[in-house]
Amino acid sequence: MIIIKSPREIALMREAGRVAALVFEEVGPLVVPGVSTAYLDEQVERVMRKYGAEPAEKGYYGYPASVCASVNEVILHGIPSEKKILRDGDIISLDLVTRKNGYCGDACRTYGVGIIGERQKRMIEIAKECFDNAMALVKPGAHVGDLGHAIETTAKKYGCSVAQQYTGHGIGRDMHEDPYIPCYGTPGTGPILREGMTICVEPMIFEHKNDVRVLKDGWTVVAKDGGLTSHYENTLVVTKDGCEILTKL
Ligand code: MF3
Ligand code: CO
């Protein structure tokens, strides 16, 4: 069931989203060579709490941290660790969900660590371009398949592939609501977007093949072929004639 949010609920989600954007603003500059992903996790939680939000990922199906910190070939759900030290040339996605006044804001950015190569830079840019091309289609009457198609064709243009088993999603009081928003699709198919729906569009991009493996920790999802991966996400609200990003300042 897809929940249409009232203007009051959208205002609350805008506030949760604003805190997510503040986290990137304050923690992004701390993504430097030599820090551990556990340090970034502490900082994410500190900034969320400073602005009156809670880390919604912590405890979600037992997830142990405030952020998913996924380095290089890790596409999703990298668990922050004291042992994982960032090195010059790495790329890392920080995927986080705030909860404030009962509503969630979910966003992800992929950062370069120190000086990164062209390969790394390209992956970061492709995920953002996939997002932008999908977001451009969001308006009442658009189909979910239109968005997935835009993400997939953009990624393919660069020889990249997209996640199959993991998708974007609706969001609200719950981190994950209907509809699911795949990174692939056929135009004109799938649920139809309506004003007041709140959705997370999140391209998850593989440099090469999209075969994945889940590590023994039960969370960490890696590209089987060891290629680079990138991820970009915002929470959007469908408006009268388009959409608004909620996870922004
Ligand atoms: N933020 C993720 C998403 O985009 C969900 C993280 S799973 C969790 O859907 F277990 F870490 F919460
Ligand atoms: Co997310």
Image (spheres, grey):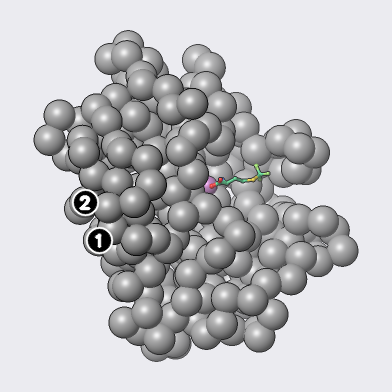
Towards the viewer: 41 or 152: 152
The answer to whether the beta carbon of the residue marked 1 is less than 8 Å from any atom of ligand 1 is: no
Residue in view at x 42 percent, y 76 percent: 123
Which quadrant of the structure image shows residue 11? top left
Residue 137: image tag: 2
Towards the viewer: 54 or 74: 74
Identify the residue under disc 1. Answer: 133
Q: Position of residue 249 (x, y in %)?
A: 30, 37
Mark in the foreground, 1 or 2: 2
Q: Position of residue 210 (x, y in %)?
A: 57, 76
Which quadrant of the structure image shows residue 192? top left
Q: What type is the residue that disc 2 sits on? A: Leu
For the residues labelled 1 and 2, say whether their Cβ atoms are less than 8 Å apart.
yes
- Label 2 secondary element: loop
Residue 94 lies left or right of residue 63; in this view the side is left
Q: How dense is the environment of label 2, judged by Cα within 10 Å: few (below 14), some, or many (20 and up)?
A: some
Residue 35 lies left or right of residue 196; in this view the side is right
Towards the viewer: 145 or 90: 145
